[in-house]
Image (cartoon, rainbow, N blue to C red):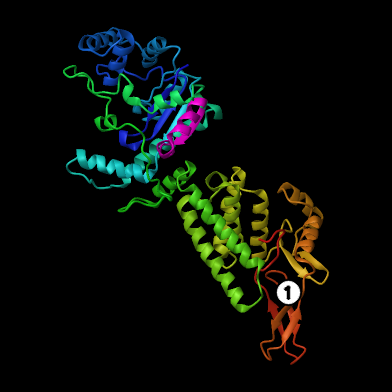
Amino acid sequence: MQVAAVSGAAPSARSTLSTAPHPARSCGCAGQRKCSPGLIRAIAECEFGEQELDTLQRARHWLRDRQHWSGADVFDALLARLAPRMAVEKSPENVATGAALRRLARAYPKARYLHVTRHPVTTQVSMVEHRRRTVPSYPLDGQPMAGIAAWLEVHQRIARFLERMPPERALCIRSEDVLDDPEPQLAAVARWLGLRADDDAITAMLHPETSPFARPGLAGSGVTGGHDPGFLCDPIPRAVELPRTVEQPSGWRAEASLWQRTVRLALRFGYGQEELRIDLLRRRDLDQAERGSFAGTPEHKARIIAMDDANTLWLRTLINRVGWPGRTLVGVDGAHAAWLIAQHADRHPAFQRRCLKLLAHSVESGEASAADLAHLTDRVLLARGEPQLYGTQLVARAEGFVAARLQDPESVDARRAAMGLVPLADQLEHARERFGTPPPARVACPSCGEEIEMWLPEPGGSTRVSCPACGLIGTMRTRLRTVTSAQR
């Protein structure tokens, strides 16, 4: 069995794709004039048993004699020498293009792939520091956007490639998790590969300095690459500070779409994901608590309106950054909380309609709930003065809760079933059990101030009212203030 591992755009980009078993038929450099120091040293070690001046020279000749070979032919020869051990290949060139990845898959169709990521902003910071040390004119125009763009390009390419792989052949891990808690993370990877995961095996993994390649190439050999002296002096993994969110680096000047795509992919890898989910759930819980304890006072009503407006602004900003927050990004409960905020954005109908379109696309891709879509659809329809489709929005009447204006009541249960909703009669019974018999609304007469008891009109509708105290006759119109099948 073989494992191939490929690194991302640049050494400091810390994006890695590892594969097991098999790298690519025309990857490698047997037919090229220049070969990487790592390959020459690998041939010297595996074919000739050591890395000395004469064996390194013999390795050069070995490759020259086989310059008609493909890269995979060279790998196969190395694999034969390493058997029964598993090999790992992680050349950055393997993710340089989509074609290179496809060659990899064709050459080794049973390979497994380990995708190691790093937070995009800390990646960019590392790239900036590296270039400041190596490029006198740095920073160049367009930084730090180039670092972010490189991170996005490589990881998008890897993600697209792995989407075509069976799930059991791909594993994505965050490098920060490995550094912060190496033993269980390395054990999990080893078990996934079918390797030993006992204490001795993990200890060996934590000491790469014992490898015959964990030193500079032999002086005077011309083969000196493949080492990091600073790392080899202290190779034990150290915990790193992982940013809790994904925020634009200072000096950002690129297009908003570049950052939006970066955040969306970073959230997919788990960066900032839990923080975003926590914020969504906190807003959901506050929403439900305020509505559940509504006392009917003007002060409480004003507090709910302010809360809804703040949540709407927050969700609008989030959508502009990452698109609709679906299940992959924030989990099932987080996606439901995002819908709840949109459901209560009644004072912002244009934004609510935008959310409806985004939610519909998310349902199609399995990222959101069809039941949530049904509720928001009815909400938007009623706000536009149209009848609802699914009967999710209820109004209070003397006989209990009833569905507000409803299109084709005879077929509503079929439509509800298609969205994963219970029959309408069950919803109405649930509302009665949960909220009891609804009392009529009490509104103050604008003329004398006396309370008028009345049943509010349907959302967007109106009704004639008269004050029994002063005889004032007027028209009452309602905004969208309905009860749904849950406290929403």
| 208 or 152: nearer the viewer | 208
Q: Is residue 343 magenta?
A: no
Q: Secondary structure at mark 1?
A: loop
In the figure, 342 relative to 115: above or below? below
User: What count of labels does the image hold?
Assistant: 1
In the shown orientation, is residue 267 left or right of residue 144? right
Residue 31, image x, y percentages:
30, 14
Q: Residue furthest front?
A: 199
Task: Tell me, yes or no, if residue 467 can be seen here.
Answer: yes
Task: Tell me, yes or no, if residue 384 can be seen here.
Answer: no
Q: Amino acid at mark 1?
A: Leu
Q: Is residue 174 magenta?
A: yes
In the figure, 198 relative to 450: above or below? above
Residue 333, image x, y percentages:
60, 50
In the shown orientation, is residue 376 left or right of residue 264? right
In the shown orientation, is residue 224 left or right of residue 117? left
- Image-quadrant location for residue 157: top left
The residue at the point 38 percent across, 18 percent down is 26
Residue 383, image x, y percentages:
64, 65
Q: Which residue is mark 1?
A: 456
- Image-quadrant location for residue 17: top left
| 29 or 123: nearer the viewer | 123
Range drawn in magenta: 170-191
